[in-house]
Image (cartoon, rainbow, N blue to C red):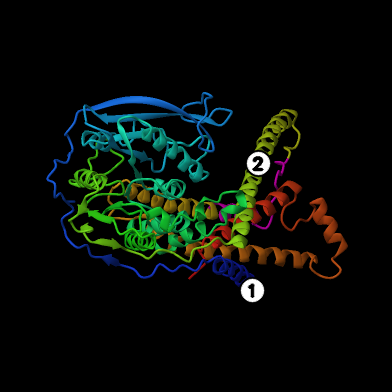
Amino acid sequence: MVSLPIFIILLGVMVCISNLTTVPWNIEPTGQSMATLTDDTKVTFDNPSGRTLPVRGAYEVDERYVTLNMTDDGELTDEPGAQGKANKDGIQAIRVLIRAPRNAPGARPGVVFMHGAGFGTCDNSFGDVASDMASAGFVTAVIDKPVWNTTDVTRDYPASAKAYDQVIDYLRAQNDVDAAKVGIYATSESTWISSYLLQDDPNIAFQILLSPMVFSPRQSLGFFITQDFTLVGANKGYQSIVQRVFSADTALFGLTNLDLDTLRPVAYAVPTYVAYGSKDVMTAQVDGVRAILDNAHKAGNWNVTIRSYPVANHVLRLGDESQAGTPFADAYVDDLIDWAVGTSAGLTQTSEKAGGTDLYQSVGLPGALKPRRAGTIYGVILHAAVMLLLLASIVLSLVALGRRASADIRWRRDRREAKRAGMPVPRRPEVLGFVHGFGNALLTLTLTTLATLLIFGAGLGQVIMGVVRLAWGGAPTETPGVMYWSWPVIQVVSVLVLWAWSRVFMHLIEVASIRGLIQLPPRRESVRDIVTGTDPVLASTRLGRILFWLVAFTMLCILLVFAFWGLFVY
């Protein structure tokens, strides 16, 4: 009669929170595909004059370095900067590795390479493809990624675009470069930057987009994580975590990059070569190609070439990119060089615009995804409170253990002295003084809740590691393990823990009722006995009572965290 209503109330609160924090999530249609016009990825051009066009390996390659000092708004300065990160004045010394074809006649077309995610340098990025393009007659420039003092989540994309444009202007000013034929090679994250670059500099001659993200970071990353959670074999419940994470209103914390408006016609107004790999698990390829073509056509550009390569991953490599020396897809480099050579020469393409393996997209783009301010504020407050409560519980538990150890030492000493003096042995002192079994109940429920939290962390951790392996080109495991069975187990255990807590609270009410504490007015002598510890309901010491309520509230807040992430949605 008492514990059941308490259980229903607790469960009702958890279920309501899980449903209120649920994010509308439309990833239909699933299993989309787009057929290419030919399986052949080769790019050919009409060459009526019959002139010889350079190919990979036509020239030896010379290399040289130059350093450009740039402020954190992407402007050049004469003041020296620091390499890797900006100095105290916000100036980064950006090294540029320029590769040029040796003894190539006339002014050559140029290409500036734009980094994807991470902190690449001119020495460890694009070395093979930049050298290959230089051997085909291009002057290529690979730079240290302009990051200044930002992180992956605070990256300044408009300033980065200005920095890359400074390098483009530097190439244009070189005697061996045709200023009207400098293009860009952008991959992954930098395809957001290239959108700003094309707005700032419409004179970019052409662009090669490798696995372009196309849509806003919120939509692109939401798609990527949702799809990969499914591919690695994670329980569908874990997708609710993706929904809640990518509905966060990060603008509350000054982070506005999730909602960048980069999908504009001007970003596709120049000749464009788009390359995807069939094993790329990070990009919405079907929706992406549709959006690229739509925006290019709005800009009056019909020179868009799409190529899709079998077995290749997000960076068009064959195999796991985390392993050194992973090669490009077989024909990718030759195809893009042929395209760049013919496009720079102003020739008319004769091969099909869309070639290679058919494009496939397992889930739809979450286009309706938007920030939810109320849920974000609640989630931040809840998680911050849980961390503080856990810290306070740990500190108070350590204090209790310290007092227990100190009391035991004194008691053993007093017992020895009493025995030697022939006096009665003193009773062991009570540090916490739990009564009516509440101490054991608190310990059991705390260990159960923390074990459930550990299982939750292990399952989520396994999902994240699986997604990372997929992103690097690895294969998903055939036995998902914890990431699959942990979700339903946590759901069941959480309900059982709620039932156990309802029984504990019922027992508290029962004991308090016997003491006359819940009658109006409360029995005076009972209140006095509880305060003095003579006849306690919960514990005979103040430390015990405080520890019980602090730990109990902390464990219930952990269940609220489970509810926030959707574990009480059935």
**Looking at this view, is 30 or 107 the one in front?**
107
In the displayed structure image, the side of residue 543 where residue 309 appears, left or right: left
Q: Quadrant of residue 360?
A: bottom left
Q: Which residue is mark 2?
A: 395
**Looking at this view, is 68 or 30 the one in front?**
68
Residue 1 forms part of the magenta stretch: no
Secondary structure category for the residue under label 2: helix
Answer with mark 2 or mark 1, whichever residue precedes in sequence: 1
Seen as rendered, the residue at the extreme left is 50
Q: Is residue 515 visible?
A: yes
Seen as rendered, the residue at the extreme bottom is 1
Q: Which residue is mark 1?
A: 5
What quarter of the picture does the N terminus occupy? Answer: bottom right
Image position of 297 with respect to 256: above or below: below
Three-letter amino acid code of the residue under disc 2: Val
Image position of 354 with respect to 81: above or below: below
| Residue 258 image position (x, y, % from top left) | 50, 53
Q: Quadrant of residue 366?
A: bottom left
Image position of 200 with respect to 293: above or below: above
Stretch of the chain drawn in magenta: 427-447
Three-letter amino acid code of the residue under disc 1: Pro
| Residue 123 image position (x, y, % from top left) | 34, 29
In the displayed structure image, the side of residue 30 where residue 149 appears, left or right: right
Q: CA distance from mark 2 to mark 1?
A: 34 Å
Secondary structure category for the residue under label 1: helix
Question: Residue drawn at (37%, 55%), measured in percent from left and top?
Answer: 268
Q: Is residue 476 visible?
A: no
| Residue 29 image position (x, y, % from top left) | 36, 70
| Residue 345 image position (x, y, % from top left) | 23, 45
Q: Quadrant of residue 219?
A: bottom left
**Looking at this view, is 233 or 534 the one in front?**
233
Q: What number is the disc on residue 29?
A: none
